Image (tube, rainbow, N blue to C red):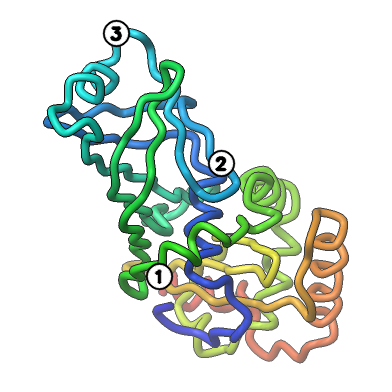
């Protein structure tokens, strides 16, 4: 996080990686000198193995079948992109290095190295933790939830800025929802030439959308009760100079 108050309740790195994997719709695959961009072609098993459903004439499938060692090495890359239009929308990148086996015409990928690249740095994730971690229960609904919040409830987003330290709002031109998970909501504060992220933690984790709704109502109630000597509207005026 670049500035603002960072709350303690955040997903573990392995859970975050599994959430990226669960929500991703596309991936880049490199194996045996072949690189392909696949869209809607992968599924994920409970233990984190990735199954690529490719066409019979796929160069990746041919490379896997013809690999001299029998189990070709490969790298899978997934981008975690914020669903709301923002400056710098890539929230994280997940890289899996491992090998393929061919099973029933599909490529089954087993990871030997899992790396999560975030703004805060690189996490090298333990393979056992990755295999046993579960995705965030809101991961597959996050895009719909954030776009609805940004498009239909901009007033609520602005009200939530009352929970942000005033110094973090200095020069703010726009605040948008960046991410949400069972532990909290992250806001992106955009200034003229920079941006920062601030996390608002829920009072307890949300395990489904109904619980998330309740957690958001609690945050909004706290925001309504908070003293707000400097509103975002005034900060916008300051930022516009």
Q: Secondary structure at mark 1?
A: strand
Which residue bears the numbered disc 1?
Answer: 195
The residue at 50%/51% (across/down) is 20
In the rendered structure, find residue 57 and report the number of the disc placed on it: 3
Q: Quadrant of the N terminus?
A: bottom left
Give the side of residue 96 with respect to residue 10, left or right.
left
Q: Earlier in the sequence, mark 1 or mark 2?
A: 2
The residue at 71%/53% (across/down) is 149
Give the side of residue 145 with respect to residue 209, left or right.
left
- Count residues near mark 3 (Cα–Cα under 10 Å), then give few for <14, some for 14-19, many for 20+: few
Give the tally of numbered discs: 3
Give the side of residue 100 with respect to residue 39, left or right.
left
Q: Earlier in the sequence, mark 1 or mark 3?
A: 3
CA–CA distance between discs 1 and 3?
45 Å
Badge nearest the viewer, 1 or 3: 3
Residue 53 pos. (x, y %): 45, 22
Which residue bears the numbered disc 2?
Answer: 45
């Amino acid at each position: 996080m670049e500035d603002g108050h960072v709350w303690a309740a955040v997903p573990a790195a392995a859970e975050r990686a599994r959430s990226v994997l669960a929500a991703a719709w596309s991936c880049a695959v490199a194996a045996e000198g072949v690189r392909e961009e696949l869209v809607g072609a992968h599924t994920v098993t409970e233990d984190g193995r990735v199954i690529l459903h490719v066409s019979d004439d796929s160069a990746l499938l041919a490379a896997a079948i013809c690999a001299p060692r029998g189990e070709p090495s490969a790298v899978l890359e997934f981008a975690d992109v914020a669903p709301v239009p923002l400056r710098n929308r890539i929230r994280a990148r997940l890289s899996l290095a491992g090998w393929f086996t061919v099973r029933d015409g599909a490529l089954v990928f087993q990871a030997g190295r899992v790396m999560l690249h975030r703004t805060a740095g690189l996490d090298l994730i333990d393979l056992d933790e990755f295999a046993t971690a579960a995705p965030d229960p809101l991961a597959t609904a996050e895009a719909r939830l954030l776009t609805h919040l940004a498009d239909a409830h901009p007033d609520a987003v602005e009200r939530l800025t009352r929970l942000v330290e005033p110094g973090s709002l200095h020069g703010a031109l726009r605040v948008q929802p960046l991410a949400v998970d069972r532990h909290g909501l992250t806001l992106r504060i955009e200034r003229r030439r920079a941006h920062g992220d601030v996390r608002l933690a829920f009072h307890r984790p949300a395990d489904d959308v109904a619980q998330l709704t309740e957690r958001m109502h609690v945050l909004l109630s706290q925001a309504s009760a908070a003293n707000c000597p400097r509103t975002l509207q005034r900060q916008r005026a300051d930022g516009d100079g």
